[in-house]
Image (spheres, rainbow, N blue to C red):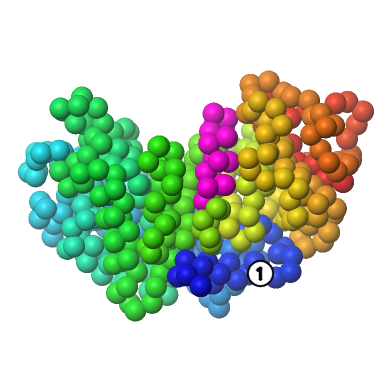
Amino acid sequence: MTLRAMALVALVCASTAAIPRHIPTWAFDEYRGEGATASARFVRDTLNYAEGGRGNDKALSDCAGGACTAVFYFDPHLIYASDACPFPAYTAFLARAPEAWYVHEPGFDDAAHRVRGTYERGCRGSSVAARVYVADVANHDVADFFADDLAREARGWGAVELDDTKDTVIAQMYGPGGGFCRDALLSSLCPRTNEFSDDAALVRAQQRFARVLATPDGSPKAFFYNGLTFGTGSRDLPLLRGNAPFVGAICENCIVNDGRLRPDMYARVLEAMARVHAIPSAAFVELNTGRSPPGSDAQIVQRLVTTAVAWLGFEPGRTIVWPNLESDTRNLAVWPEDALYPTSPLESWPELEVAPGVWRREFARCYEAGIAIGPCAALLNANPRAVTVERGWLRERYAARVRLLGGDIGSGGTIVRAAFGASPWLVPPSGALLIAR
């Protein structure tokens, strides 16, 4: 068994019962932010992956005993600097780093030509315009620095979210607010930098960097990289191949970005899910964000769409949902629809598309909180107008649609299977329909 397979089996052990009570779930679990109101028992009952980070180990405490996996947030790529409000995660790096620890524009190695940008970040209740630099992860001293930092801060955590980790130079040098690097010779975003001659050089550096990060405390760590990209050079998912300790890729805001649906991305994400799952033991994490009021029409549309996408690409234990759709509350972002567990799929990619921009996937046996409910299916519509479900699209017979009532589980949200009326079944514009017997 490969290292990736061993790591992922350990991470999803809570999902290996005959019929899990929910699909694999991920959420923030913090003392002062999201998850603050959630008890350890509630976290263990509803989450597979609980995320925290530096100075915030509620997730580590809540997942004690292995009922869930505590995920440590770590971003060693983008270095934030502010004279008005220093960021603790980067003060040691900024104080120690020689110029060789930074990435530079092609042909330069001086401070005036660092790859750089600015980003508005919150600090002590206010917003500051922070300078942002890019760390040279190909530099052995940089790798050793962050390996020591991670070993000190993340001891005992089960996995690491390695943020801002890309497999192309253009994407890696593209940060908050736009492109951080422009190639004067090509008059374009940088396909190379002084430190990375091409995408292949960056991938080799990222894989070596992850291996170095995994070793200081003597036990291999599992890394999920947040930075799934869709460029030509990314189609082969190079970071998930080879012997680097990456067990999964996170697709952030690919379907819902701060409450805004992205129907232009539906097909690309479904294809990416299929490509990830074609790699033995690799996981796909669907991270989406929103701030709509709990149980509002807008939020329910977002939840139906993100759940439909998960079902359309579902691979047991390897499709992980992270619908962070109440990012402005202290509740745990877990949802009643997570308790719906589809099994025995009747179709797979690429046979899911039944009409232009419309996909469906049926499952012969589905469960709600471990109890059999018969067949179920998901339909997704990327078109700007509603589409009518045609009988020829479905093999099984269904009588009900899944309705979502209220918000997250902690606030009393529920689901019901409501009988269809005589009117045609419609999949809303840019929306989704979940159906059951």
What residue is pinned by disc 1? 16
Q: Amino acid at mark 1?
A: Thr
Magenta span includes 210: no
The answer to which of 317 and 275 lies nearer the viewer is 275
Quarter of image, res 261 = top right
151 lies left or right of 43: left
Q: Main secondary structure of the magenta part?
A: helix
Q: At which x and y percent is residue 401?
A: 81, 40
Above-or-below relation of 45 to 406: below
Q: Which residues are magenta?
A: 258-276
Does residue 35 show up? no
What's the residue at 48%, 57% (across, down)? 248
Q: Is residue 259 magenta?
A: yes
Picture quadrant where residue 403 is located: top right
Tell me if residue 406 comes above or below residue 263 in the rendering.
Answer: below
- In x, y percent, where is residue 415? 77, 48
- Seen in the picture, residue 79 relative to 246 is either above or below; the reply is above
Q: Where residue 426 appears, x then y in whole percent?
A: 78, 28
Please tell me which residue is depicted at 56% across the width and 75% down the height of the picture: 66
